[in-house]
Image: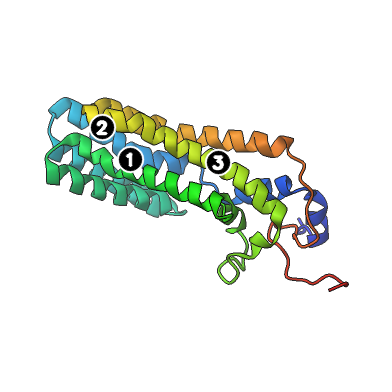
Amino acid sequence: MAEPSPESEAATVATVEDVIRHRVSEVLGGWYGSLETALPTVAFVVVWLVRSEIRPALLAAAGVALVLLGIRLAVGGSVRYVLTSIFATALAAFFALRSGRAEDAFLPGILTSAAYAVATLISILTRWPAVGFLVAAGDPEFAEHPSRWRRDSALVRVCSRLTWVLVALFVVRVGIMAPLYLAGEVAWLGVAKIVLGWPLYLLAIVVMGLMLAVGQTPLTNSTSANGVPSTRKSPDS
């Protein structure tokens, strides 16, 4: 089957929302990646509930993460999510073993969500919305021109609205998990981390999808079909 020409691709992309939907669909991870990040947490909580000991729970989480890495290397594909899981497990182990409290295994995740909430909010206020980088990430020239997408003011406005969804996501995570952490509810922290992980992320994507479905923001002349503003000058310039 012949590859679609740039002209035919451009014909299918009519609005800023279409551009963003096209680009985001290319860079989001699937269900298997979310499984790789969730299973070590499940192992930690289950073993901790059975043994009420930190070290066996952390060893179980680390063991599951390493098994997942072996499977990923065997079947092929990106190891990004499982490496993220291994890093998160190691960080959780450092915090929990240092303090001797099982709930501290969840503290890095809470602090990370809080930092993301602040960072995404700042990205909106400074007109560098975080979703904009997600939209542009699939461009082959993104490494050389990471800020080229900002030349389209309509794209920046839509990406800002979408980034508010991410702000809400991180605020919800912190708002639920921080009280559980302060109360020392290890089991509920494990449940919350899983539920507020991929399921909440999926809900955020659905909300973004609905926003994109109802939006009809026209493209400017400088925006290319692949979602990245073009460097070509108009005849009048």
Question: Which amino acid, mark 3?
Answer: Trp
Q: Residue at x 73, y 35 (%)?
A: 214
Residue 214 lies, with reference to residue 130, above or below; the image says: above
Cβ–Cβ under 8 Å for marks 3 and 1: no
Name the quarter where the N terminus is drawn: bottom right
Q: Is residue 52 left or right of residue 19?
A: left
User: In this rendering, does residue 209 appear at all?
Assistant: yes
Residue 168 on image: x %, y %: 49, 36
Cβ–Cβ under 8 Å for marks 2 and 1: yes
Residue 53 on image: x %, y %: 12, 33
Residue 189 on image: x %, y %: 29, 30
Question: Which amino acid, mark 1?
Answer: Ile
Question: Which residue matches tag 1?
Answer: 110
Question: Which residue matches tag 2?
Answer: 181
Report the Cα–Cα distance between label 2 and label 3.
Answer: 25 Å
Report the Cα–Cα distance between label 3 and label 1.
Answer: 19 Å
